[in-house]
Image (cartoon, rainbow, N blue to C red):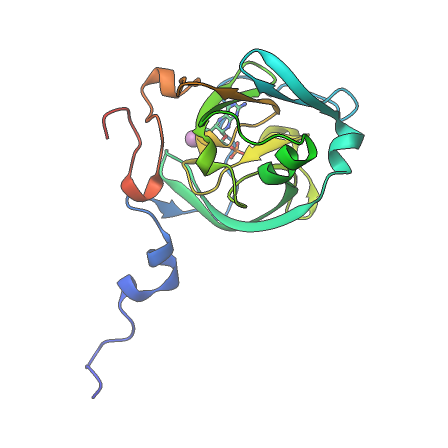
Amino acid sequence: MVTRGFVGRPGNSDQSTRLPPGQHVVTDFPILSAAPTPRISAEDWTFTLKVGPRPVAKWNWAEFNALPQTKMTRDIHCVTTWSKLNTFWEGVLIDDILAAANLEAPTAYTLAHSYGGYSTNLPVADLLVGKAMVATRYAGQPLAAEHGGPARLLVPHLYFWKSAKWVNALQFTERDELGFWELRGYHHYGDPWREQRYTND
Ligand SMILES: Nc1nc2c(c(=O)[nH]1)N[C@H]1C(S)=C(S)[C@@H](COP(=O)(O)O)O[C@H]1N2
Ligand SMILES: [Mo]
């Protein structure tokens, strides 16, 4: 039986099942930064792993790019309601960064830190088992400075403010310490599927 005038419900389309509540699809790549773009050359860039205040491993650009490289195609969701589908990234999984440092996550929480002073908090569980990377390439090209180059965090299953641009450190913390936007009214976790936009959502 064929239902008259019924050619695939919008609710059945691939796009709408992939879109978290309150989001719409964009095809451009908006730039959202709380401060001017810090211009960090690859030669000056470093990435540090910390346990509390203590640095436990550090890589320069060449060393970091010698770590195992992973490709990821993911949908990304900004809290300002745009989503971009099938974004293609290359970089180093957090799993591989910890393995290279011979470190097992010593606490359950982290803060990612960026050049320019931005930070964001993430549970360790949201960074491991292939869920997150430090991305150095987007769409087959070196990551543009406006989008966080030389390197940014990519945690695509959470709102995109968790994907810290110009990342330079990942710090393990005993407690869930809040980052830049989380201190300014945004949700402490930020799951787009549960529409966790603001602190009390
Ligand atoms: N260092 C830093 N990272 C950041 C931000 C920022 O202001 N500074 N903005 C966040 C927000 S709110 C979003 S939506 C995304 C935007 O990334 P894009 O500019 O590449 O789209 O970066 C996130 N990471
Ligand atoms: Mo955002």
- On screen, residue 39 versus residue 31, left or right, reads right
Q: Return the x and y of residue 32 as percentages of the image width and height.
A: 49, 28
The residue lying at 64 percent from left, 16 percent from top is 55
Q: Nearer the viewer, residue 147 or 73?
A: 73
Q: Return the x and y of residue 153 as percentages of the image width and height.
A: 56, 32
Q: Nearer the viewer, residue 153 or 165?
A: 153
**Residue 108 falls in which quadrant of the image?**
top left
As drawn, 7 above or below 62: below
**Residue lying farthest top?**
53
As drawn, 107 above or below 5: above
Q: Which quadrant: the C terminus?
A: top left
Q: Return the x and y of residue 119 as percentages of the image width and height.
A: 50, 19
The residue lying at 76 percent from left, 19 percent from top is 44
- On screen, residue 29 versus residue 199, left or right, reads right
The residue lying at 52 percent from left, 40 percent from top is 128
The answer, for residue 82, to whether it is visible in the render is yes
Q: Nearer the viewer, residue 127 or 140?
A: 127
As drawn, 136 above or below 176: below
Q: Which quadrant: the N terminus?
A: bottom left
Q: Return the x and y of residue 138 as percentages of the image width and height.
A: 63, 43
- On screen, residue 163 versus residue 196, left or right, reads right
The answer, for residue 46, to whether it is visible in the render is no
